[in-house]
Structures are given as structure tokens and as C-alpha cells.
């Protein structure tokens, strides 16, 4: 079985449906064609009794997925953004499918896993990080706001850790990814091939003949397979490296509990903690509009009842970002010209008004996803 897209390799390995993102030269960044292929494959495998487990991984040595292909997004946004709106719509619907997938969905978050890569992995049933994992939602760095359901994960991270990560675009190592709820298990990268082989053997042993009168019900089969997958992963899991953020909870929780972005910056500067001053430098280097919109969106995400409701909000927010100045400028500075000197408009947090922020969250005709 194949999605017939070179950038997404799909095949059956015994009872395991393998999905390999296959753009290693671009850190497996996602195109709309890849999103469509993933959706087609997952829909087909949900109904295919040969597939007991789905495993997502990335080609190459550098990572699972660095996110969306933002070069393509830059060009489309300059032309009006219709293609990017369609990309977001299909991507967020795929994220919702992964979160509710009827079969065990195992994501190997080895190496760089950011933005859209988080959306494909961190909503799965079984999420694995390695010593090479770097996990992040770096959207504010390019004038966007955490999306792909990442705002829900950040909103429900312990204390104010998610606000810190979302506003600064800081990265998590494997220990932090586990602490913040982006991953479940730590498996050293050298043991991943052994783990995948064990999953294949386990899936084969729990496979049922669909023509047999004794084939278990779908619910029973799924539960047996999930238990088997959990046992296999547990057998390969090792203690994770310490979570660096755990030791920083005190100043993070105190500073990021402030009401406004300006007050957060003031608390960080006055904390006397070296890491807090580093956080200020990161935050103030990001789009001021995106930082304020992210703060509002993350706090509102804490009150929303489901991933689907958060994805609906994220679609509105992302479409609003497409209509602004900073997204095109942020991508230009980071990946087109690579001068790392974005000219944000407004240029400061003080220049971003409450009306500017409200524009991101307000429902607008045509910018509704309709998942919730």
C-alpha cells in the first residue's frame, strides 16, 4: 500500500503500517501534497484489518520533521495566502484525526521535531523521544502563533512552562518534552531499530485472520494490540536525561503569570536570574504581535474543552496572521534572506494594541474550521 508520493513512504511491515517522511534534504518539512498523502494513508489504514499499529518516523539522521515548508508559505502569503489557508485547514484536520486514531499510533520523535512535526507526532497515542530530540513550537519567531494543536499542549504543560516556551520559541530536550506533555517515553536512538523490529513481531502475533469466524471484535483487537505495543515500548524505555526546565519552575511560574507581555518582560528583567534574562532576549527578538497574540491564545486554550476546539481557534489565529505583515517578514529574515534581522510592524510590544490582539481571536466569515 502506498500513498504514491515520493516525500511520504508508506508500506506494511507485517502488521505495522510504516509512514516515513522523506524529505531529508529539507528536514522532512511538510508540503500540502504530503499532508494529503498522510490523510489518504491513515484513512485507508483505519479500515484495513491487516494494519494493527501505525509507526511514524523521518528519513535521514537530522529529525522527524522541522515543520511546514515555510518557503512555500512565504511565496503563497505574498500572493494572498489562499494556498496556505487550505494547507492549514487540511493539516489541522489531520492533527485531529491522529489524536482520535482508532489504532495505536506510534511517533518516533528522533532529532528535530518542530511545529508541524509536533502536530504529526505529539497527538499520537505513543510518543517516543531520544537523546537527539529537539522539540519546539517556534512560531512566534516567524510572526505566527503556536498551532497544529500545539497551543493545547503548551497550555496544559505544568505551571507556566508552556507560556514560556510559546512566547520565546525555546526548544525542549527529551527530558523537557516528557515533563511538558509532548512525549511519553525515552528510548535511546541506537535502540529504535530494535524497538521497531519488536513492534513488527508483536503486531504479527496479535494479527487476526479477517476471514475467520473467531476474529475478535474491533474494540477487543484494538485493546489487545495497544497493550502489546505498550509492553514492547516499555521494554525498550530507559530513564530520560534530566528536564532542564524542572529546575527553573520557580522563576518561570512567577514571571509568566503576569497579566501582560510587558509585565512578563519586566518580571523577567527584575528576577535576577541569568536564564530569565536570556528568555527576555528570545522573547523580544520575536514578533511583538505574535507574542501578544500567542499569550492570549494560550491562555484561552486552557479554557477550551477539546483539541478540536483549540484547532478551531488556531485556524482563526493562523488566518489572521496571514493577513498581517509579520509572517512574510519573519520567514524572509529567517529562511529567505537569512539576515536574522526582521523588521516587525509594530516593532515593540507597546505598539501592539488590544484591538490588534482581538483581531486574531475574533471569528471571521470563511476562517472557521468547524471541528468542534
Image: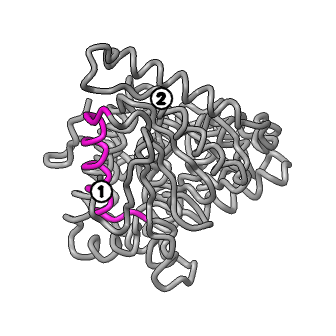
**Residue positioned 67% across, 30% down in the render:** 234
The image quarter containing residue 34 is bottom left
Q: Secondary structure at mark 2?
A: loop
**Residue 66 drawn at (x, y percent):** 51, 62
Q: Which residues are magenta?
A: 29-49
Residue 106 is marked as none
| Up-down relation of residue 117 to residue 181 (above or below) | below
**Residue 263 drawn at (x, y percent):** 63, 44
**Residue positioned 84% across, 54% down in the render:** 274
As measured in the structure, the alpha-carbon distance from the residue carrying label 1 to the one carrying label 2 is 39 Å
| Up-down relation of residue 346 to residue 135 (above or below) | below
The image quarter containing residue 82 is bottom left
Residue named by callout 2: 302
Q: Left or right: where does residue 324 sit relative to residue 81?
A: right
Residue named by callout 1: 2
Which of 228 and 74 lies nearest the eye of the viewer?
A: 228
Which of 280 and 191 lies nearest the eye of the viewer?
A: 191
Overall secondary structure of the magenta stretch? helix
Magenta stretch containing residue 329, yes or no?
no
**Residue 321 drawn at (x, y percent):** 34, 58
Q: Left or right: where does residue 301 sit relative to residue 185?
A: left
Amino acid at each position: 500500500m502506498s500513498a504514491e508520493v515520493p516525500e511520504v513512504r508508506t508500506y506494511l511491515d507485517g502488521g505495522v503500517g510504516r509512514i516515513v517522511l522523506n524529505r531529508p534534504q529539507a528536514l522532512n518539512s511538510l508540503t500540502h501534497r504530503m499532508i494529503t498523502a498522510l490523510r489518504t494513508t491513515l484513512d485507508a489504514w483505519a479500515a484495513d484489518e491487516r494494519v494493527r499499529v501505525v509507526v511514524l518516523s523521518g528519513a535521514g539522521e537530522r529529525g522527524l520533521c522541522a515543520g511546514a515548508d515555510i518557503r512555500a508559505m512565504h511565496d503563497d502569503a505574498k500572493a494572498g495566502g489562499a494556498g496556505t489557508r487550505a494547507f492549514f485547514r487540511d493539516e489541522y484536520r489531520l492533527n485531529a484525526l491522529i489524536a482520535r486514531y482508532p489504532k495505536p499510533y506510534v511517533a518516533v520523535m528522533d532529532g528535530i521535531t518542530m511545529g508541524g512535526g509536533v502536530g504529526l507526532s505529539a497527538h499520537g497515542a505513543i510518543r517516543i523521544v531520544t537523546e537527539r530530540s529537539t522539540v519546539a513550537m517556534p512560531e512566534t519567531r516567524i510572526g505566527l502563533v503556536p498551532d497544529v494543536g500545539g497551543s493545547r499542549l503548551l497550555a496544559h504543560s505544568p505551571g507556566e512552562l508552556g507560556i514560556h516556551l510559546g512566547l520565546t520559541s525555546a526548544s525542549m530536550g527529551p527530558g523537557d518534552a516528557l515533563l511538558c506533555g509532548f512525549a511519553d517515553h525515552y528510548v535511546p536512538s541506537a535502540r529504535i531499530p530494535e524497538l521497531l523490529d519488536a513492534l513488527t513481531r508483536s503486531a504479527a502475533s496479535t494479527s487476526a485472520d479477517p476471514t475467520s469466524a473467531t476474529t475478535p471484535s474491533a474494540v477487543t483487537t484494538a485493546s489487545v494490540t495497544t497493550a502489546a505495543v505498550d509492553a514492547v515500548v516499555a521494554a525498550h524505555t530507559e530513564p530520560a536525561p534530566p528536564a532542564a526546565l524542572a529546575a527553573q519552575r520557580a522563576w518561570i511560574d512567577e514571571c509568566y503569570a503576569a497579566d501582560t507581555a510587558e509585565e512578563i518582560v519586566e518580571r523577567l528583567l527584575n528576577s535576577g536570574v541569568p536564564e530569565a534574562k536570556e528568555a527576555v532576549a528570545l522573547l523580544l527578538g520575536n514578533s511583538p504581535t505574535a507574542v501578544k497574540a500567542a499569550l492570549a491564545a494560550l491562555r484561552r486554550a486552557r479554557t477550551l474543552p477539546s483539541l478540536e476546539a483549540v484547532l478551531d481557534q488556531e485556524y482563526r489565529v493562523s488566518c489572521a496572521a496571514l493577513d498581517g505583515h509579520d509572517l512574510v517578514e519573519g520567514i524572509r529574515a529567517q529562511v529567505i534572506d537569512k539576515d536574522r534581522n526582521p523588521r516587525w510592524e509594530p516593532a515593540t510590544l507597546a505598539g501592539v494594541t488590544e484591538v490588534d490582539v482581538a483581531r486574531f481571536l475574533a471569528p471571521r466569515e470563511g476562517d472557521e474550521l468547524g471541528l468542534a
